[in-house]
Structures are given as C-alpha cells and as structure tokens.
Amino acid sequence: MNKYFFADMSVMLGRSMRHIFRSMDTIFTVCITPIAMMLLFVYVFGGAIETGTDNYVNYLLPGILLMAIASGVAYVAYRLFMDKQRGIIERFHSMPISRSAVLWGHVLTSLVSNVITMVVIILVALLMGFRSSAGILSWLAVAGILLLFTLALTWIAAIAGLTGKTMEGASAFSYPLIFLPFISSAFVPTDSMPKVVRAFAENQPVTSIVESIRALLSNQPVGHEIWVALAWCIGIMIVAYLFAMRAYKRKAA
C-alpha cells in the first residue's frame, strides 16, 4: 500500500464531499422519498396494518432507513460513472497518488452522506412519535449494522458505476434494492403473506437486518437474527468489494 494512501484518500473524500455540499439537493432528494413513504404508511395505511404494536412508526423505521441507504448509494454509481466517462479517473492515475484512493474516496463519501440522511430521517421519525428504550450499546449496534449495510450496497454501486455503459444503466441497479424492503417484514409481518412470498421474505437479507434493528431499538433480545444479518452484510460486502476492485483495476490498467 502506498505510504501516502490515507492522505490521498482524504483528498479524494474532500473532493467528493465538496460535490455533495455544493448540490445539497442530492441529500434532500434521497431523504424525500423515504420520509414521504414513512408519512404515507404511518398516517394513511398505519391504522389498517396489524403489526402487534401500538406505535407503527417504531415498527416501520428500520425498513425506511434501509430504503434510504439503497436510494443513496445510487449516487455513488452515478459519480463513478461520470468520472469514468470524463476521463477523470485516468487523469488521477497519471498523478503520483495511490490508485485505489480514488475509489475509496467515493466509498467513504457514500458512508458520510448516508449517515447524514439517516440522522435526518430519525429526527423526522421522532417528530412523528418514534420512541426507543435502547441504551447506548444497542444504538451503537444499530449504527454498526447500518454502516455495514451501507458499505455492502456501496460496493455493489461501485460495480455498477465502473461497468455501466450508460448513466441510466449505472444507476438502475438501485431500483430492486429500494423495493426489496416491501417483500420483507419491514412494513408488515411475514405471517400475512402467501407461502411462496413468505418463504422469500423470511430468507432474504432485509428481513434479518430489519428484525435485528427493530429488536435492538425496542431493547428486546435479538436472538440469532443479528448473526444472520451480520453474515448477509459482511458476505455481500466482501463479494461486492472483490468484484468492484477487479472492475476498477481493469479500468486502471
């Protein structure tokens, strides 16, 4: 590893973050849809959905956060694709900097911007009546799961951005990820679903992640679900990282 890797990466992070703060509509756009969904489900559909809890926003929030992350990482694919199309990646590689720092700058920008988005959504949820009895350790565990999930999806976004042929194709990968929470326990218990749909819902990543976060926020035992959630996040992250680095090295060659 280049001895100046971390210094180079911080420069690339600063560059990407300046792009974000110069167009704050990016963060607002990512926040608007999940917040609108939260308002819709709580105040329109919430009274008709039986979840076994009196506070539907508490039940709903974990799934909304995952939707926001899936929406937010699409901008990583977009920014990487634009850097590739404009020859900016090649231009950076002609300079005496660590080559992987360019990619890591985009990845860390995704983490920072998604953290900002999640904080905004949680603040709105608090105004809507969200309450948690979780202690500091439980909140740290929730933060850790969300950061792992963000990293996993960010590396998938990096693959799309580096291999996409068009801007639309590079960012289209996020649509199935955004709607995956709908076929999980994020909005309704899986018991109410048909057998085939229920089997899929109970064995896909979002359900175990949502159930773990929900249990942690309500200060309930998490059981084995947290290990399943961590296995999904870490497994997806490692596989996506390997494919993303392979695609990046081909572009850097």
Image: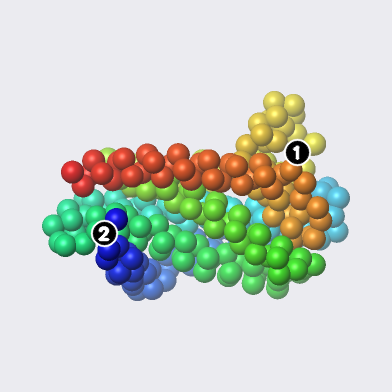
Q: Residues within 10 Å of mark 1 (few under 14, many from 20)?
A: many
Asked which quadrant contains residue 199, the reply is top right
Q: Residues within 10 Å of mark 2 (few under 14, many from 20)?
A: few
- Residue 131: in sight, yes or no? yes
- For the point 58% across and 69% down, the residue is 119
Amino acid bearing label 1:
Thr
The numbered mark, 1 or 2, whose residue comes first in the sequence reads 2
Position of residue 242 relative to residue 216, above or below, is above
Q: Quadrant of the N terminus?
A: bottom left
Indicate left or right for 244 with 175 as reference. left
**Coordinates of residue 216 in the picture (x, y in percent):** 74, 58
Foreground of the two, 154 or 30: 154
Amino acid bearing label 2:
Asn
Question: Could you say which disc has been placed on residue 2 in the image?
Answer: 2
- For the point 21% across and 47% down, the residue is 252
The secondary structure type at the circle numbered 1 is helix
The secondary structure type at the circle numbered 2 is loop
Indicate left or right for 19 with 86 as reference. right
- Residue 48: in sight, yes or no? no
Question: Could you say which disc has been placed on residue 227 in the image?
Answer: none
- For the point 65% across and 64% down, the residue is 140
Q: Which residue is mark 1?
A: 190
Foreground of the two, 203 or 31: 203
**Coordinates of residue 193 in the picture (x, y in percent):** 75, 34
Indicate left or right for 129 with 70 as reference. right
Name the mark nearer the viewer: 1 or 2: 2
Asked which quadrant contains residue 91, the reply is bottom left
Indicate left or right for 44 with 241 as reference. right
Q: Quadrant of the C terminus?
A: top left
**Coordinates of residue 212 in the picture (x, y in percent):** 71, 50
